Amino acid sequence: MALLEKYHAFCDESATSEKFTVIGVIMCHDSIAPKFEKWLEKITEKHGGSSELKWTKAKKHNLPLYMEYLSAFCKAMKRATLNFIALL
């Protein structure tokens, strides 16, 4: 009997108007989630960031934090440890 594998799904929505809403999901295997979370915590601590990031709050003084987060996500997706799906 095959065992089911566990995955983590992190979801968020963005409503830019009454007509459009985007739902984004980042998924990763159960074994990857704690490692990736620690990686993001290190980035956040390094830059003195907050617990919630919003692109609308990206300013010149905190742009390096946002860019390093984006780089981390792209590296993880390139290695196929994270998957991103968006629904409009």
Image (cartoon, rainbow, N blue to C red):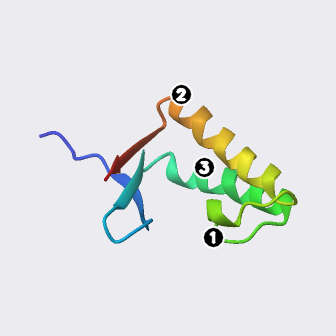
Where, quadrant-wise, is the N terminus in this rendering? top left
| Distance Cα–Cα, label 3 vs label 2 | 16 Å
Residue 34 position, x and y percent, is 56, 55
Q: Residue at x 51, y 52 (%)?
A: 33
Q: Amino acid at mark 1?
A: Glu
Q: Earlier in the sequence, mark 1 or mark 2?
A: 1
* In this rendering, position of residue 72 left or right of residue 45: left
Q: Nearer the viewer, mark 1 or mark 2?
A: 1
Asked if labels 2 and 1 touch by Cβ distance under 8 angstroms, the answer is: no
10 Å neighbourhood of mark 1: few (<14), some, or many (≥20)?
Answer: few
Element marked by disc 2: helix
Q: Of discs 3 and 2, which sits in the foreground?
A: 2
For residue 78, the mark is: 2
How busy is the neighbourhood of tag 2: few (under 14 within 10 Å), some, or many (20 plus)? few
Q: Residue 87: give x, y in percent of width and height.
A: 31, 51
- Mark 3 Cα shell of 10 Å, populated few (<14), some (14-19), many (≥20): few
Quickly name the residue at label 3.
Answer: 35
What secondary structure is found at the residue carrying circle 1? Answer: loop
Q: Nearer the viewer, residue 7 or 77?
A: 77
